[in-house]
Amino acid sequence: MKKNAGIVLAMILYAFLAVGIVFVIYIGGTYPVGADAMSHVYKGNVLYHNISQGNWYPLYDNLWYNGVQMLGTTSGVFFGVLSIPSRWK
């Protein structure tokens, strides 16, 4: 019973937090546009195809800024998680 009450309390807390974030964005007039969203999708797609070929950490892709290292400044864990839905096609 206590576990269920904790889960319900957490859900209510998250709902208030989400409403608060929306309110702050609405008041401030700015909106997170996600201009680099497709770059994250591209990295996840490239990582998925490389993992399916046995390469678990691809360093370079010739289509990514003329061969600049793709995952050099970011963790590959996020893009690994991002590549999981590609298996569900």
Image (cartoon, rainbow, N blue to C red):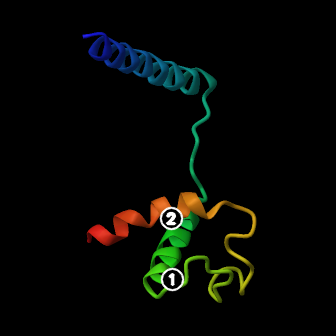
- The percent coordinates of residue 7 (x first, y second) are 33, 19
Amino acid of disc 2: Gly
First in sequence: mark 1 vs mark 2: 1
Image quarter of residue 57: bottom right
| Residue 30 higher or lower than 39, as above or below | above
**Which residue carries the number 1 mark?**
50
- The percent coordinates of residue 36 (x first, y second) are 60, 59
Q: Which mark is residue 67?
A: none
Residue at x-position 46% and y-position 75%: 48
| Residue 56 higher or lower than 85, as above or below | below
Amino acid of disc 1: Asn
Q: Is residue 55 left or right of residue 59?
A: left
- The percent coordinates of residue 71 (x first, y second) are 68, 70
**Which residue carries the number 2 mark?**
80
Image quarter of residue 83: bottom left
Residue at x-position 36% and y-position 20%: 11
For marks 1 and 2, give the CA distance. 11 Å
Residue at x-position 75% and y-position 64%: 73
- The percent coordinates of residue 29 (x first, y second) are 60, 29
Locate the N terminus by quadrant.
top left
| Residue 11 higher or lower than 69, as above or below | above
Of the pair 61 and 57, the residue shown nearer to us: 57
Q: Residues within 10 Å of mark 2 (few under 14, many from 20)?
A: some
Label 1: which secondary element: helix
Locate the C terminus by quadrant.
bottom left
Residue at x-position 60% and y-position 56%: 35
